[in-house]
Image (spheres, grey):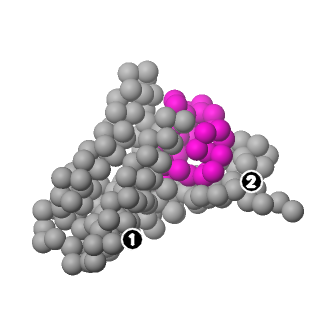
Amino acid sequence: MNILGIIILIIFYSIYLGKMILQKKKGIQTDQMAKNKQKNRVFYIELILKIATYTVVLIEIISIFMTPSQLPQVFIISGAILCITGDIIFAAAVFTMQDSWRAGIAENDKTQIITNGIYKFSRNPAFLGFNCVYIGFVLMFFNVPLLLFSIFAITMLHLQILQEEQYLAKTFGETYINYKNKVCRYFGRKNKF
């Protein structure tokens, strides 16, 4: 499982860094988290989120080389499947967003609202991909620090989503509200009767 854990992380963060590099070549600053913002709630949530996500990566790497998980094999295998699913969801999200993808709220960038591809089934598939990898890693390499930091990072991602929803409603208005009424925050479509 150690090699699989390393491969999962390499794939996930290669997608993230690769997209940032490709966008940088086009003059796009992908990482907008806690940058060029007033020191307000948005800034502090993004700053804490950034710290949380970097810390989780470090703890994930350390967890791979710690004592093997004491969880039953079915949890470990389920975790691996969840991590692989997270990699796939994240890749689909980043690919579908094209040049509108940003990490953080890009108040000064002109982006488009994306509602096609995987965004037909999730308003936040990139965050869903992160969450799948975090939860899957906890199942694969269970230890208390990994559990606690993963819960913290997932909580911070959720707070970021709530901020982004306010920003998107303000920026895209009725178009975003209609989309929000059709597609669930994490996964699924809403039935309107």
Question: Could you say whether the residue bearing mark 2 is in a helix, strand or loop?
Answer: helix
The rendered magenta stretch, by its main secondary structure, is classed as loop
**Which percent across, then down, holds residue 61?**
19, 57
Direction from residue 171 to residue 127 in the image, left or right: left
Q: Identify the residue at horizontal 39%, vertical 71% (top origin).
A: 151
Type of amino acid at the residue the image marks with label 1: Ile
Q: Identify the residue at horizontal 33%, vertical 72% (top origin).
A: 74
* Residue 112, magenta (yes or no): yes
For disc 1, the marked residue is 151
For disc 2, the marked residue is 182
**Which percent across, then down, holds residue 172?**
71, 42
Mark closer to the observer (1, 2): 2
**Which percent across, then down, holds residue 181?**
75, 56
Which quadrant holds the N terminus?
A: bottom left
Q: Looking at the image, do the residues carrying marks 1 and 2 touch, with CB atoms under 8 Å apart?
A: no
Write down the region rendered in magenta. 98-127
Asked if residue 132 can be seen in this view, the reply is yes
Q: Give residue 53's quadrant in the image.
A: bottom left
**Which percent across, then down, holds residue 165?**
63, 54
Q: Is residue 125 above or below residue 52?
A: above
Q: How many marks?
A: 2
* Chain-order first, disc 1 or disc 2: 1
Q: Identify the residue at horizontal 44%, vertical 41% (top origin).
A: 91
Question: Could you say whether the residue bearing mark 1 is in a helix, strand or loop?
Answer: helix
